[in-house]
Amino acid sequence: MMTDIHYWLALLHLPGVGPMRWQELSQRYASPRALFEQGVQDALIDPGLRESLRAPDWQAVERDLAWAGDGRQILVRQDPRYPPLLAQIHDAPLVLFVHGPIELLTTPQLAIVGSRNPSRLGEETAEQFAHTLAASGLTITSGLALGIDAAAHRGALAGKGQTIAVFGTGPDRIYPASHRDLAHAIVDAGSVLLSEYAPGTPPLPAHFPRRNRIISGLALGTLVVEAALRSGSLLTARSATEQGREVFAIPGSIHSPLSRGCHHLIREGAKLVETAEDVLEELAPQLRAVLAQETAVEVADFQLDADYRHLLECLDFSPTAVDSLVDRSGLTVDAVSSMLLIMELEGYVATAAGGAYIRTGKESL
């Protein structure tokens, strides 16, 4: 029996039909099923497409479906769990292949991207920013590439936070192959590997610029750590700007070619950031809105309830690590991270070096 997901996958494999073409077709057809069932008789559709509609690649569809299971899921555009921020972009993917918890796709995210051949300082900076921001409750999204991408994923995992790796290949193809262990670590940590390409899709050059729009489209903002003037990272930043998202850039030495891309972005209006707190401060309004929707809490009218007071009592006025707070409070890592983010936005706590937190004393004012 054919289900709706069969037809979405058949659409994915239809020659010449991608997100933009489907937007046009969806003005006349309410669903992929309707397109396949009725389009063969539609004189307004070009003959080549009508011929393809008569012979969908059902074998490819079955291969896609066989990939699912054991923590792997297929998410189509009509699914209510499809990430709303990504759905807002004009060329949102028709299908997402998700290895890991789908709910992570709707968490507040920051994309971190940069050079595949960064300086050692740039790599360390990306890892430190990701560590602190992930420990603060942001999900770190990147592309599993060499250099800054990998450092961002590692930093998020080290901060006991969450990360999403967006592939330019099928979900079963790790690229580069040297990042196989990192990809396994991401899954083992309860984070996500994500692709819009069907299983078995090789790493074709054209796929990676397309992937960048997903990285920025999932996130509230994009942080560029190091980038040359001609780099994929600047394409990701451009996508973020076109999508109405924030763009951040870390400045560097005027003598380094890897600083020129970031300096160009800053001249074009990107926010110059020096610390992870700069990012959190800039994203605070969006974070408030997202957290209010997710938790049904009016963050603007936030007050400390018993759980928040309990967590606050577990904090010191000297830096306290998230792991220590989990042990002291008895709460889960996810709960502690989310509560700390809200309390930081409200001024009850502040971040310290290494992703630790301190009390500000606001509750006694």
Image (spheres, rainbow, N blue to C red):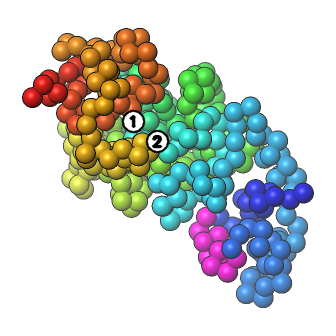
Instruction: Please give left or right for residue 72 compared with residue 306 in the image.
Output: right
Q: Which residue is disc 1 drawn over? A: 138
| Snapshot quadrant of residue 279 | top left
Marks 2 & 1, CB-CB < 8 Å contact:
no
The location of residue 183, given as percent across then percent down, is 59, 28
Identify the magenta region: 19-29
Residue 75 lies in the magenta stretch: no
What amino acid is at disc 1? Leu
Q: Quadrant of the N terminus?
A: bottom right
Q: Which residue is disc 2 drawn over? A: 107
Q: Quadrant of the C terminus?
A: top left
Q: Nearer the viewer, residue 300 or 46?
A: 300
Q: Residues within 10 Å of mark 1 (few under 14, many from 20)?
A: many
Q: Label 2: state its secondary structure.
A: loop
Residue found farthest to the bottom? 43
Earlier in the chain: of badge 2 and badge 1, it is 2
What residue is drawn where x is 30% and y is 15%? 314
